Amino acid sequence: MSEPLLTVADSLKDRARAALGSRNLILVGLMGAGKSSVGRIVASQLGIPFIDSDHEIERVSRMTIAELFAAYGEDEFRALETRVMKRLLKSGPRVVSTGGGAFVNERTRRHIKRGGLSVWLKADLDVLWERVNKRDTRPLLKTENPKQTLENLMNARYPIYAQADLTVLSRDVRKEIMADEVLKAVIEAQKENAAS
């Protein structure tokens, strides 16, 4: 009787799933970093649910993110975001993509730190700009010079995103490659924790 051969992809998925255990995997980073698109693939590969926190906020408020910003302002939106994230992270495992400002909010960041393993999808300005300049659905980019605004957000937020448990470089490659790199980072983090 011969044993079935595992493909490299199956082995990667299985090792990452074992390394994650019952924890949530929370993707953080700027708009356009790939949190939602990569997160869906990662969740599918791990066989666990995927939740986009922005979609969940829209579902519970019955308003779009842009409408929430316009009606209540950023501070009230961030308070709602914190409440939603706290609820989402109470159980797991699941993959959660966050809005770009979620991790910047200290209260939300504490919930993320307690609620699982955070992964910063870090991208350079040109990659982000190429991804976000095609749509005008980003409330924070409704400015006279949106590319400069995006760069300003990078300068302000990147030191905070650097507090995430893991960092994976988001670049101009297929989403499936990015997803595999997230899985590899989860495995490596577990190995490092086991060694220390």
Image (cartoon, rainbow, N blue to C red):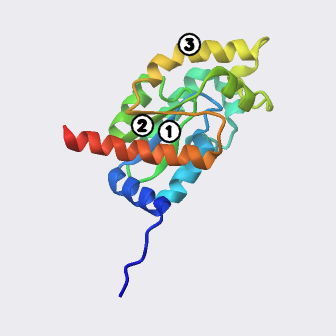
Above or below, 189 relative to 110? below
Residue 38 found in image quarter = top right
In the rendered view, tell whether residue 148 sits above or below residue 115: above
The quadrant of the image that shows the N terminus is: bottom left
**Disc 3 marks which amino acid?**
Asn
Q: Is residue 30 left or right of residue 109?
A: right
Q: How many residues crowd around disc 2 within 10 Å: few (fewer than 14), some, or many (20 or more)?
A: many
Q: Residue shown at 60%/43% (left/top)?
A: 36
Label drawn at residue 155? 3
| Residue 181, image x, y percentages | 50, 43
Measured in 3D between alpha carbons, the distance from the residue under mark 1 to the one under mark 3, in whole angstroms, is: 19 Å
SS assignment at label 2: strand
Q: Is label 2 in contact with label 1 (beta carbons under 8 Å)?
A: yes
Callout 1 crowding tier (Cα within 10 Å): few <14, some 14–19, many ≥20: many
Of the residues under marks 2 and 1, which one precedes in the sequence? 1
Task: Tell me the residue at 68%/14% (across/down).
Answer: 149
**Which residue is pictured at 42% across the width and 77% down the height?**
4
- Label 3 crowding class (10 Å Cα cut-off): few <14, some 14-19, many 20+? few
Q: Nearer the viewer, residue 99 or 29?
A: 29
Q: Are marks 3 and 2 in contact (CB under 8 Å)?
A: no
Q: Quadrant of residue 114?
A: top left
Provide the residue designation for mark 1. Answer: 27
Q: Secondary structure at mark 3?
A: helix
Instruction: From the top left corner, tell me how far across and down residue 99 is, in percent.
Output: 57, 33
User: Could one spot residue 22 in this view of the protein?
Assistant: no
Residue underneath mark 2: 118
The amino acid type of the residue labelled 1 equals: Leu
Quadrant of residue 190 within the rendered picture: top left
- In the picture, measured across the screen, residue 16 lies left or right of residue 96, that is left
